[in-house]
Image (tube, grey):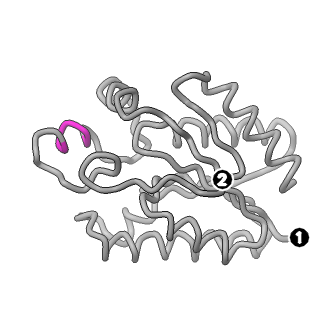
Amino acid sequence: MQGWAIWLTGIPGSGKSTLARIVVRGLRERHVYAQILSIEMIREVLTPRPDYSEKERDIVYGTLVFVAKLLTRNGVNVIIDATANRRKYREAARRRIRRFAEIYLKCPLEVCMKRERKRKRTFGAPTKIYLKAKTGASKTVPGLGAPYEEPLSAELVLDTALSRPNKCAEEIIRMILAKLG
């Protein structure tokens, strides 16, 4: 049986990595197994010194979609943990992966910036990105220096500024079990 893929998208600090891990644990408790596929895993191999250019993002996200497609085609359920600032990256996954859902973690920029300043674990993501964007050291941060294109047809939209992570994770799990499981 083919696996499914969900893509957790939102600007940095919206809760993608945190929710991916809570969802994996919640699914495991229900005997449903999934692999987290983070953009940082792909970047570490393809671009160990990323410049976050459009060209580099096309390569990295293209590879991410390819790997997710291979995994799902071989029966592995995948949770994609990646901002994907351009809609085209997520739409490519929708076209190529038969059982696919996009989950938009909507969160105000100010809340994401505050979270990013406080967080201790980054799950491999670069640190102090908003500070770098504010000081002009980086012009490629989605939501500040680079555009973030909100999904047009996400299967689920969660406001992570208003809902606790465990509540959001339960909503994601319910959606997975109802639509993909």
Q: Position of residue 53 (x, y in %)?
A: 26, 68
> Residue at 40% of width from left, 75% of height from top?
58
Is residue 115 or residue 126 the one in the foreground? 115
Quarter of the view holding residue 90: bottom right
Quarter of the view holding residue 35: bottom right
Mark 2 Cα-neighbour bin, 10 Å: few <14, some 14–19, many ≥20: some
> What's the magenta region?
129-133
- Answer above or below: position of 60 versus 79: below
> Residue at 86% of width from left, 44% of height from top?
31
CB under 8 Å between discs 1 and 2: no
Q: Main secondary structure of the magenta part?
A: helix
Query: What residue type is disc 2 on?
Result: Ala
Residue 115 horizontal side relative to residue 20, left or right: left
Q: Give how far apart the Cα atoms at labels 1 and 2 are.
A: 24 Å
Numbered tag placed on residue 1 in the rendering: 1
**Of circles 1 and 2, which is in front?**
2
Q: Position of residue 44 (x, y in %)?
A: 37, 62
Is residue 98 or residue 50 the one in the foreground? 98
The residue beneath circle 2 is: 154
Query: What residue type is disc 1 on?
Result: Met
Q: Position of residue 60 (x, y in %)?
A: 41, 71
For the C terminus, the image quarter is bottom right
Is residue 11 or residue 128 the one in the foreground? 11
> Residue at 22% of width from left, 65% of height from top?
51
- Answer above or below: position of 158 versus 34: above
Q: Position of residue 26 (x, y in %)?
A: 75, 35
